[in-house]
């Protein structure tokens, strides 16, 4: 069938940045298995930049959740119904995206069985958390329930301006090696504490320049970290780079220290070396790093209260936050030593 006449696919993922990044693995899978099928992607407003220049996306649809949320949802449904999609696939368990899928008029309407609108899907796929299956594999089963191949990493494509921006900022390292640290998270109990980051900054070998990364909401936290460290050659780049430019910069780092949060998935999407620090959450939830060099650091002994939730909390429910405070700086340095040995 000619490409122009193949029914298009619409993928829906309107959750957080990391969720959209992981969903890009489906774009590579579709391109490999159905290269002539056009693919559109629906994201929440603010995340569309992740797909800028992506070679396997035809159109990006945007839902502004902060402005006329439900009116916008209705308008999106009309837009979707006017497009002859052969398949609409929601990667979420929420009613809003289930509604768009269920009433899309697509011949195939696919989602997870926990979605409230699953009864109107043509295929509802079981959704299980905590068994160690990676989120990418859960999503791939929406396209092919029998898929049991390797976990496909997500893939982002920094644009030439993003690459240029990263190269310009990398010059701050004066040609020497550098390390990136993304110290924040939306969830407090997923965030390695400031005091712990300060210990790492003090212990890192002096030959490394350190870049602090984050979005506009993270500028203040990174500035405070910069103000409190006595280390030289630390630069706060939070809020000054696009997500794709940050990914390009991280790709050139000797190592990237991150939380269980979006920067970890940015690393996975460009193959950047990563050390992911897990506090209240655990890799068994299925959101771990997928870079060629990926290491996880967590508390070195079992803790009865861990994990305390899928996303974490605004504060430790028990008040001690031992899952973060009992991680040793030596654990983080051991990952760097391993990475240096790999590069030697």
Image (tube, grey):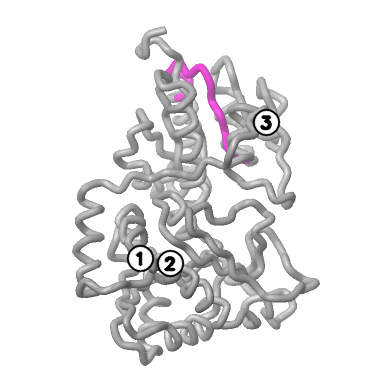
Determine whether label 1 and label 2 are within 8 Å by CB.
yes
Residue at 67%, 27% in the rendered image:
146
Return the residue at label 1: 253
Of the two numbered discs 2 and 3 on the same chain, state the one appearing first in sequence.
Answer: 3
User: What stretch of residues is rendered in magenta?
Assistant: 80-92
Mark drawn on residue 267: none
- Farthest top residue in view: 1
- Residue 190, position in %: x, y? 59, 68
Quarter of the image where the N terminus is located:
top left
Of the two numbered discs 1 and 3 on the same chain, state the one appearing first in sequence.
Answer: 3
CA gap, disc 1 to disc 2?
7 Å
Mark drawn on residue 117: 3
Answer above or below: position of 91 versus 30.
below
- Residue 234, position in %: x, y? 32, 80
Q: Secondary structure at mark 1?
A: loop
Residue at 32%, 56% in the rendered image:
248
Mark drawn on residue 256: 2
Q: Is residue 256 magenta?
A: no
């Amino acid at each position: 069938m000619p490409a122009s006449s193949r029914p298009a696919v619409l993928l829906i993922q309107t959750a957080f940045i990391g969720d959209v990044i992981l969903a890009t693995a489906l774009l590579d899978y579709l391109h490999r298995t159905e290269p002539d099928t056009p693919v559109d992607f629906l994201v929440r407003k603010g995340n569309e930049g992740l797909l800028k220049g992506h070679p396997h996306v035809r159109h990006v649809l945007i839902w502004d959740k902060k402005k006329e949320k439900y009116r916008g949802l209705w308008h999106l449904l009309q837009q979707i119904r006017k497009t002859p999609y052969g398949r609409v696939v929601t990667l979420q368990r929420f009613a809003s995206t289930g509604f768009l899928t269920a009433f899309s008029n697509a011949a195939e309407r696919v989602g997870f069985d926990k979605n409230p609108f699953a009864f109107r899907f043509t295929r509802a796929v079981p959704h299980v958390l905590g068994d160690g299956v990676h989120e990418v594999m859960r999503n791939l089963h929406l396209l092919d329930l029998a898929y049991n191949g390797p976990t496909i990493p997500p893939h982002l494509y920094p644009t030439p301006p993003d690459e240029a921006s990263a190269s310009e900022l990398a010059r701050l390292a004066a040609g020497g090696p550098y390390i990136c640290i993304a110290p924040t998270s939306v969830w407090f109990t997923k965030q390695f504490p400031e005091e712990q980051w300060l210990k790492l900054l003090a212990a890192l070998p002096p030959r490394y320049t350190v870049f602090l990364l984050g979005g506009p909401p993270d500028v203040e936290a990174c500035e405070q970290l910069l103000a409190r460290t006595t280390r030289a050659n630390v630069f706060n780049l939070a809020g000054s780079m696009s997500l794709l430019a940050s990914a390009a910069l991280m790709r050139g780092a000797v190592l990237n220290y991150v939380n269980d949060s979006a920067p970890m998935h940015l690393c996975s999407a460009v193959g950047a070396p990563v050390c992911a620090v897990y506090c209240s959450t655990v890799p068994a939830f299925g959101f771990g790093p997928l870079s060629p060099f990926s290491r996880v650091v967590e508390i070195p002994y079992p803790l009865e209260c861990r994990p305390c939730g899928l996303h974490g909390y605004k504060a430790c429910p028990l008040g001690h936050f031992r899952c973060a405070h009992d991680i040793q700086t030596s654990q983080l340095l051991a990952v760097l030593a391993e990475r240096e040995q790999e590069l030697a």
